[in-house]
Image: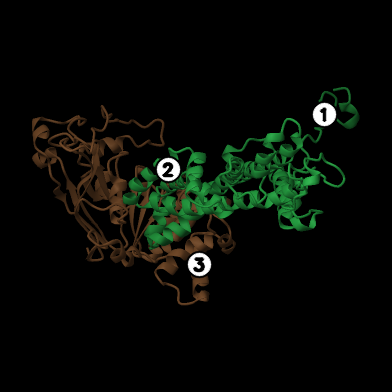
Chain colours: A brown, B green
Amino acid sequence: MSIPILELNDVRKRYPVGSRLPGRQRRFVHAVDGVSFGIARGETLSLVGESGCGKSTVGRTILRLTDVTSGQVVLNGMRIDGLSPRGLRPYRRSVQIVFQDPFSSLNPRMRVRDILAEPIRNFGLATSAADLEAQLVDLITKVGLRGEALDRRPHEFSGGQRQRIGIAKALATRPDLIICDEAVSALDVSVKSQIVNLLADLQREMGLSLLFISHDLAIVEYLTHRVAVMYLGKIMEIGSRRQIFGAPKHPYTKALLSAVPVPDPEAERSRIVLEGDIPSPIAPPRGCRFHTRCPLAFTRCREEEPVLAVQAEGHEVACHLTEAGN
Amino acid sequence: MSAAPDRFPDSAVGVIAAPEMPDILPEFTPRAGVIGFLRRNPRIAVGGTILLLLLFCAVFAGYLGTVDPAAIAPSRRARPPSSEHWFGTDMIGRDLYSRVVYGTRVSLFVGFAVALVASGIGLAIGLVAGFLKWVDGPVMRVMDGLMSIPPILLAVALMALTRGSVGNVVIAIAIADVPRVCRLVRSSVLSLRELPFIEGAVTAGSSTPRVILRHVLPNTLAPLTVQATYICASAMITEAILSFIGAGSPPDVPSWGNIMAEGRMLWQVKPFIIAFPAVSLSITVLAVNLLGDGLRDLLDPRSATKA
């Protein structure tokens, strides 16, 4: 693996909750609790997990929309977690985001032209007015819309078209990494596949890296190179697509995969149904975070927290069972 | 069904032809241009027209058959309306028509000026308070404090501190309205700043002032415009109240509140003295409110009440 575009080292983010009265101990939501991974150039890493497991927060810390509590965010070899907002601005160019909701991610009062031109102007990426215009046309055609779209406003477009505009906006700064935060979750199935294909094409064409945050495992399997499975702010298992989908090791990963619908009514399926809800991230369970719902939990899981251990080349699992089993 | 066979003479026996559907829906072609716009927004049309007429009166008050509104004529006191004095004369013989027409100036000026000043200041404070957390608490508590004082009492108190002039009236009323604008703007900023397109602007490299001016500000203007028209209407009333109780425009400036105050003593015998300025005020406030409702329906279709 060459130098990664992005590296997270033990990133933690906690939010204070409840009373701020003195004398009362403050409690915290541990949204992200020690996450580390890297993304190589041109690679897609998918972050999957249930709602509230902290996957979006990870994306936001990379964009510095949220500051990390501790840990390092290294972008192109440069630590960005401690930079001031002003010092950070030049580095913003290399990471962009595509949001989930295509209806609130574009300023309704701006024309598409101005929406796309804003990042180009901010980073001084156009040498002249003609150059800017050429870039705008190039962007809008790249995402499969026509040049006329530039002079319209967001409300004149459908959800899928808006998401294309959102992608064009993310591409405008010529980033190295695009974070897709549930970027296709709000779209209809047919539109969804178009957008996923567009992303895949753009990635091939431009050598982009993608951090694909999603709970839709079918799309993840179609599009990704590597997968990281998160549960309650921690990565439970990380590995290549083949390792995760072909030979999942962690009981949580297995349970997630067994919940993916199979398009064959006759198929025999053994569903692993998890009991109970996700425990509160304010007071995560002792030991393995998953032990309260894990069908295979044993004594050690309740006392000792497993750490990510290498199973195979690039395949890491945080589970006592795999440690013992191998 | 009896008519059906006639329309389809060649149809096979047993086939029941559906009767032709009448054109229930006339073709919808929205008319372009100003006329079409006004037809679709009758409240804006009515309110706007009345306001334009009033504005015309205010600007050209000297050319509308008026005489000097301050000229007294002790021999012609409290005359009822006649061809010579269209609205009659007041208790010191001043021509009421002229005074009411000139009074339009004060009312409109105060209404518009208060709306502008209060929205401007409220917008600035609200934007900052909504965007910067450390400013928010202190500033909004001050605003709450201001709001706890009844606006008219606040205005009376402020007028007591200064000399009676139209400018001071504007400032006194505007100060009482700033907290309301401020709250409105702050609340829209608070909901806007959580929207992805604001965060998208941040990741696109826009500086905070730029995010506020390009992305937040334009999206707060619609509710603010509506609020401003209501402020305008209430400011006109407040000005009249202040003038009525003698804490508003100075006595030498004819304002509707003044005129009503002066007609107060005679109202049982000469009700027209109080009626003409009162009706003018009502019409003006109605026009502004109509315009405001029309704008609200236009700018915020969710709360629209379809007539």
Q: Residue A136: which numbered mark, if any? A: 3
Q: Is residue A161 visible?
A: no
Residue A173: quadrant of the picture: bottom left
Amino acid type shown at disc 1: Pro
Q: Residue furthest bottom?
A: A127
Chain of the residue under label 2 = B
| Quadrant where the image shows the C terminus of chain A | top left
Q: Is residue A266 above or below residue A51?
A: above
Chain of the residue under label 1 = B
**Residue B134 vs residue A126: left or right?**
left
Q: Which residue is mark 2?
A: B146
**Residue B59 vs residue B83: left or right?**
left
| Residue at horizontal 89 percent and vertical 26 percent from the top | B3
Q: Do labels 2 and 1 touch, CB within 8 Å?
A: no
Chain of the residue under label 3 = A
Q: Which residue is mark 1?
A: B19
Q: Give the Cα separation between the discs numbered 3 and 1.
A: 54 Å
| Residue at horizontal 29 percent and vertical 46 percent from the top | A55
| Quadrant where the image shows the N terminus of chain A | bottom left
Q: Is residue A246 visible?
A: yes
Callout 3: helix, strand or loop? helix
Circle 2 packing at 10 Å, graded few (<14), some (14-19), many (20+), is some
Q: Where is residue B46 shown, x and y percent of the image? A: 73, 44
| 2 or 1: mark nearer the eye | 2
**Residue B246 vs residue A212: left or right?**
right
Amino acid type shown at disc 3: Leu
Going from N to C along the chain, the mark reached first, 2 or 1, is 1
Q: Where is residue B242 shown, x and y percent of the image? A: 57, 43
Callout 2: helix, strand or loop? helix
